[in-house]
């Protein structure tokens, strides 16, 4: 069991470094879409929620699972859609470069 | 089959990373977001193959419900309300983590066989998830102005929070050492009785309270930091859920988001020249009443301000060569982004070179102004970051400050006793002329006077930003 935990911690730490590398390259102009987009990614909790909701719990466990799926899914769909809505508005100067 | 599912999660994680990488330029960003969404779709689809899942009814109910809610939110939200939206979604992410961890805990306590590492992950997940959830709801309330945006302070703030944290750790520790399923043991069993449901509920409630108490003392202007931090928390909550259910996909994704939120938090703190602990515990601006004409009355240190009419301001703008617009939160409040764009169009058609100077903490979340201006169809290459435009200000004929205050206060540069001393600002006072559009002489969020307003090259145009802009547009047309 401990080996699993260590392995997971290794993955976590390495992923944090990947995150730092990737995110520091995002320009400030895209920081709001970055937040809403990464927010949608954190909705990945839906995977855990789906397992819990589908495991055949009775009563409280099942209710918690379904609620969790709904919350995470709101996060995912809302996050990705609103990010797309924002990003489609970003455009470059259309009438050519200007000095 | 399990191996295949795990590989699919890895693919999803790679899609997330590549998607985030494409956010490094506005040109590829939209594609990157779609890629990340595709990764999510893969992850959800393969989860349906998970052998532990025996019933699909509940899953689909949740998926449909959440998708609908998310779609409605995403389509109807105003761009000015984006900080609220992100705060709310952060909170939902936290809620999902609490619920998953709670359900998993209940399952483990039924079937037994929990190990110490899973038990710790479960409790941690509940704590982080609940703090994220309630903290985000308070942030949402403040941004939506359902709760006072002023910092709410209470006596013994720090000791009380420390005590609360201690109570949380004790309860969590109790839940960890109590072998689920067996009779409750230890001293605390007298408090909680037998069974695990009561202490579990207590843990959730205490964590929720901690979330509320952590965000309530933080003022409206510090919201960019808080949202970024909660963003980070929501990632950590997702990662901790990954530890609970032993899923590397969740751990990687959560770590990415956690890192992202942390970086943004750092950037925001740096842009305000404050430490994170100062933001979290400082209750900055708590003494600021920001009332009425306080600025004018307290003009002893500043001198007099010059008012300008829309007509005169329009002439200055219309005959400038280089103009810079500095948008602040006031622009968002009065939904004036389209009016700004129209004014800029008018000026450009007269040959004025118009640029926008964006301070990192302008607005209520990182990058908020950029999104608002993009909505008004302002090309992103006209938006200049602080460090890039500051050396240019001395060559600028006129700066139009719209609803920004502290981020253009020269006191940050030259008044050592000022609370904002050291904060990086836009050096608009170095321009030939400055026109400040403001509703009144109210103080900014920092609750301090702005010496820029008393400079000889500054003139004030009072009124609602949108109304004033419309007047300017009309006058520029005639000029």
Image (tube, coloured by chain):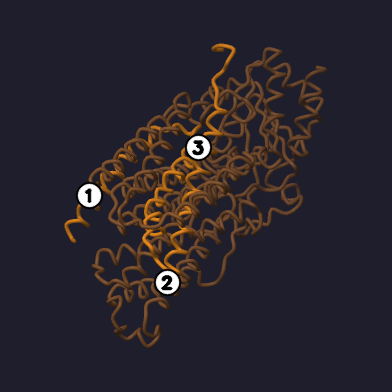
Chain colours: A orange, B brown
Q: Is residue B338 visible?
A: yes
Tag 3–tag 2 contact (CB < 8 Å): no
Q: Are marks 1 and 3 on the same chain?
A: yes
Label 1's element? helix
Q: Are marks 3 and 2 on the same chain?
A: no
Q: How many marks?
A: 3
**Quadrant where the C terminus of chain B is found in the figure:** top right
Q: Is residue B94 visible?
A: no
User: Label 3: how many residues lie within 10 Å, few (<14), some (14-19) or many (20+)?
Assistant: many
The residue identified by callout 3 is A33
Q: Which mark is residue A10?
A: 1
The residue identified by callout 2 is B203
Q: Which mark is residue B405?
A: none
Q: Are marks 1 and 2 on the same chain?
A: no
The chain holding disc 3 is: A
Q: Earlier in the sequence, mark 1 or mark 3?
A: 1
**B176 displayed left or right of B319:** left
Q: In the figure, B249 relative to B400: above or below?
A: below
B330 vs B446, nearest the viewer: B330
Residue at 81% across / 30% down in the picture? B309
Residue at 58% across / 15% down in the picture? A94
Label 3's element? helix
Residue at 59% across / 41% down in the picture? B363
How far apart marks 1 and 3 lie (CA) works out to 29 Å
């Amino acid at each position: 069991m401990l080996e699993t935990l260590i392995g997971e911690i290794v993955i976590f730490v390495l992923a944090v470094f990947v995150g730092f590398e990737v995110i520091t390259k995002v320009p400030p102009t895209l920081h709001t879409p970055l937040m809403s987009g990464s927010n949608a990614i954190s909705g990945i909790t839906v995977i855990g929620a789906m397992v819990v909701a589908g495991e055949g719990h009775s009563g409280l466990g099942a209710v918690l699972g379904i609620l969790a799926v709904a919350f995470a899914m709101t996060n995912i769909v809302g996050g990705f859609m609103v990010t797309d809505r924002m990003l489609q508005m970003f455009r470059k100067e259309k009438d050519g470069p200007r000095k | 089959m399990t191996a295949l599912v795990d590989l699919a999660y890895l693919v999803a994680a790679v899609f997330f990373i590549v998607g985030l990488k494409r956010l490094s330029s506005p040109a590829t960003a939209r594609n990157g977001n779609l890629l990340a969404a595709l990764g999510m779709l893969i992850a959800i689809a393969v989860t349906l193959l998970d052998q532990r899942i025996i019933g699909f009814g509940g899953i689909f109910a949740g998926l449909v419900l959440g998708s609908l809610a998310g779609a409605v939110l995403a389509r109807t939200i105003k761009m000015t309300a984006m900080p609220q939206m992100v705060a709310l979604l952060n909170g939902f992410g936290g809620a999902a983590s609490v619920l998953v961890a709670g359900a998993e805990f209940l399952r483990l306590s039924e079937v037994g066989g929990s190990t110490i590492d899973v038990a710790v992950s479960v409790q941690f997940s509940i704590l982080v998830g609940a703090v994220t959830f309630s903290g985000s709801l308070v942030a949402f309330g403040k941004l939506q102005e359902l709760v006072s945006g002023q910092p709410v302070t209470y006596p013994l703030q720090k000791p009380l929070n420390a005590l609360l944290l201690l109570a949380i750790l004790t309860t969590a520790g109790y839940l960890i050492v109590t072998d689920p399923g067996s009779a409750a043991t230890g001293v605390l069993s007298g408090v909680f009785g037998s069974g695990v449901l009561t202490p579990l509920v207590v843990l959730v409630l205490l964590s929720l309270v901690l979330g509320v108490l952590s965000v309530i003392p933080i003022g409206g202007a510090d919201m960019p930091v808080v949202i970024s931090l909660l963003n980070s928390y929501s990632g950590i909550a997702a990662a901790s859920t990954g530890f609970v259910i032993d899923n590397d996909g969740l751990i990687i994704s959560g770590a990415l988001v956690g890192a992202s939120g942390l970086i943004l938090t750092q950037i925001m703190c740096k842009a305000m020249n404050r430490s994170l602990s100062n933001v979290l515990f400082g209750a900055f601006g708590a003494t600021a009443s920001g009332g009425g004409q306080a600025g004018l009355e307290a003009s002893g240190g500043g001198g007099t301000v010059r008012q300008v009419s829309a007509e005169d301001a329009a002439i200055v703008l219309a005959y400038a060569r280089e103009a810079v617009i500095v948008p602040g939160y006031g622009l968002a409040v009065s939904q004036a982004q389209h009016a700004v764009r129209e004014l800029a169009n008018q000026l450009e058609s007269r040959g004025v070179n118009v640029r926008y100077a964006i301070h990192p903490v302008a607005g209520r979340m990182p990058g908020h102004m950029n999104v608002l201006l993009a909505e008004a169809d302002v090309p992103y290459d006209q938006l200049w970051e602080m460090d890039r435009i500051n050396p240019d200000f001395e060559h600028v004929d006129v700066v139009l400050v719209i609803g920004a205050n502290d981020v253009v206060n020269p006191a940050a540069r030259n008044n050592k006793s000022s609370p904002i001393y050291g904060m990086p600002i836009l050096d608009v006072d170095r321009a030939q002329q400055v026109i400040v559009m403001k509703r009144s002489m109210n103080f900014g969020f920092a609750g301090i006077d702005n010496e820029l307003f008393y400079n000889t090259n500054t003139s004030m145009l009072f009124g609602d930003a949108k109304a004033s802009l419309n007047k300017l547009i009309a006058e520029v047309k005639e000029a």
